[in-house]
Image: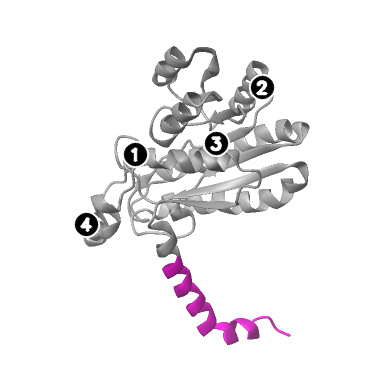
Amino acid sequence: MKKTIIITGASRGFGKIWAEAFLKRGDQVVVTSRNIDHLQDLTVRYGNAVLALQLDVTSKADCIAAVAQAQQQFGSIDVLINNAGYCVFGAIEENSEAEARDMFDVNVFGTLWMTQAILPVFRGQGKGHIIQLSSVLGINSLPTMGLYAATKFAVEGFSEALQAEVADFGIHVTLVEPNSFKTDFFGSSAIESNAIAAYSKVTSDFRNGDGVKPENIGDPFSTIEALASLVDVEKPPLRLFLGKLAYPWTQYTYAEKLASWDQWKEVSAKAHGH
């Protein structure tokens, strides 16, 4: 059945790939970007099936207006994919105040504002699906990507609570958690903090590590089938990994966390006080 889907950050990467895939199969898609010129090819190819909107997700008022325009154009809305976001690379000491605030504005607050904007629509309909583009770094972290991971940890935290809050309204929430893919994530959309020489080794180790080897970076077009399944399934999961590396890495890191908590469990229990 044809669906109406809103995708933020649809000018490139996953957002562009998924938007075109949904349009090709006959869905109606609302695509947003800070630069609407990057969306014109979709409007030329798919005509009235696509609504292109210029949107700065850091403005809550603009998010509310975008959802209203989408509803006015297509009536009901089935899915919101909060895809807008970017990465600042750098060790924690290297990250500037402006870099930190700007990335949280987009990755966390932008996701929050769009989520809040769509919720009254979904509640009124008695149905809807919010898909948050998180990351495997929303549940694990890496050196030189700590600030980005922090934004995704934040999205994971409020989205997990959201799922419990809106389940009785017929609204589903899914956190999509990709490992590395060949998108623009490491390219022009990324920002690098000013380097501090003391962190040159840890930065070099990361940039030459297994996680960035070509054979360990996924093909973004191969995610289309997974996203289609996620959008179409009656009872979507709260979390979905994309890629073959995310699950084994998480198994390893969570085993380490459980072992540490277990080692200190007596200290933890005594701290309770009674």
Residue 71: image tag: 2
Marks 4/2 in contact by CB < 8 Å: the verdict is no
Marks 3/1 in contact by CB < 8 Å: the verdict is no
Q: Residue at x 61, y 43 (%)?
A: 233
The residue indicated by pointer 3 is 81
**Tag 2, which secondary structure?**
helix
Q: Nearer the viewer, residue 177 or 156?
A: 177
The residue indicated by pointer 4 is 208
Kind of residue indicated by mark 1: Thr
Instruction: Say whether residue 102 is visible.
Output: no
Q: Residue at x 55, y 36 (%)?
A: 81
Q: Earlier in the sequence, mark 4 or mark 2?
A: 2
Comparing labels 4 and 1, the label whose residue is closer to the camera: 1
Q: Residue at x 66, y 22 (%)?
A: 71
**Tag 3, which secondary structure?**
strand
Kind of residue indicated by mark 4: Asn
**Magenta residues: mostly which secondary structure?**
helix
Note whether 15 is above or below 71 in the view shown. below
Q: Earlier in the sequence, mark 2 or mark 3?
A: 2
Q: Which residues are magenta?
A: 251-274
